[in-house]
Amino acid sequence: MVVNVFLFDDFEVMDAFGPVEILGRVPEHFYVRFISLRGGLITGKQEIKIWTEPLNPVEIEDIFLIPGGTGVKSFLHMEGENGQQLLKQAVEEASFCMMVQNASALLARTGLLFHRQVADYAYDENWKRMFTVGIDYIDGEKWISDGKYYSCSTTVAAMDMTLALISDNLDVSVAEKIAEEIGYSWDSSF
């Protein structure tokens, strides 16, 4: 499966690289590529620089991973309708969409999460209410899957969510082996 990691300036580095570390443990099943709206160099919140390919929605397949971070607000403000439309088209092409923390706010504006359950995350409540009408935010859950949409509340929960996606699509034993390899205590009972 192709894992399309969608990056934007000031993304939260561990939101992207926690799941990438896990998915990268089984390269026979997952190929990871980094994309952004226009391609080129993207700088994460922790000053990590990543070279990305430009987003072409028709090339998207399999998994679309969106990290959270302070850059979410900037993306929504600066990219406007065109950026949101490209993002919506890309997610529609994907078989699965993984959203970490406030990344769900990017999709909330597109309408794709209308009447969907999403893991609640700590963020400015007024700002969340402006963009999330019709989305059922579930408080107290580490991660949730609703159809093809996987969401999680924290950076650490992204690891649980990623292992669950692997369990759902490959086998629980594969996810357990990865968790053991990286020394992560995964509770697969969710």
Image (cartoon, rainbow, N blue to C red):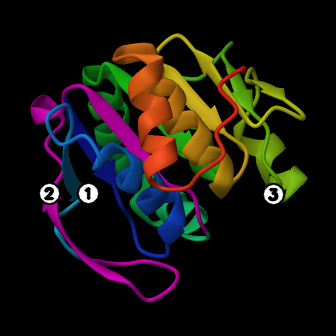
Are circles 2 and 1 on residues that touch, CB within 8 Å? yes
Rate crowding at label 1 as few (under 14), some (14 to 19) or many (20 or more) other CA atoms within 10 Å. Answer: many
Report the mark closest to the observer, 1 or 3: 3
Q: Is residue 188 above or below residue 2?
A: above
Q: Position of residue 145 (x, y in %)?
A: 60, 20
The amino acid beneath tag 3 is: Tyr
The amino acid beneath tag 1 is: Leu
Q: Is residue 10 above or below residue 84?
A: below
Rate crowding at label 3 as few (under 14), some (14 to 19) or many (20 or more) other CA atoms within 10 Å. Answer: few
Disc 1 element: loop
Q: Position of residue 20 (x, y in %)?
A: 36, 53
Disc 3 element: loop
Residue on which the image places disc 1: 37
Residue drawn where x is 36% and y is 61% of the image: 7
| Screen quadrant of the C terminus | top right
Q: Tell whether 168 sits left or right of 101.
A: left
| Screen quadrant of the N terminus | top left
Residue drawn where x is 21% and y is 48% of the image: 32
Q: Is residue 105 visible?
A: no
Q: Label 1 to label 3, Cα distance in Å?
A: 24 Å
Q: Residue furthest bottom?
A: 47
Q: Which residues are magenta?
A: 42-69
Closer to the camera in the image, 72 or 122: 122
Are circles 3 and 2 on residues that touch, CB within 8 Å? no
Residue drawn where x is 28% and y is 24% of the image: 94
Residue on which the image places disc 2: 54
Disc 2 element: strand
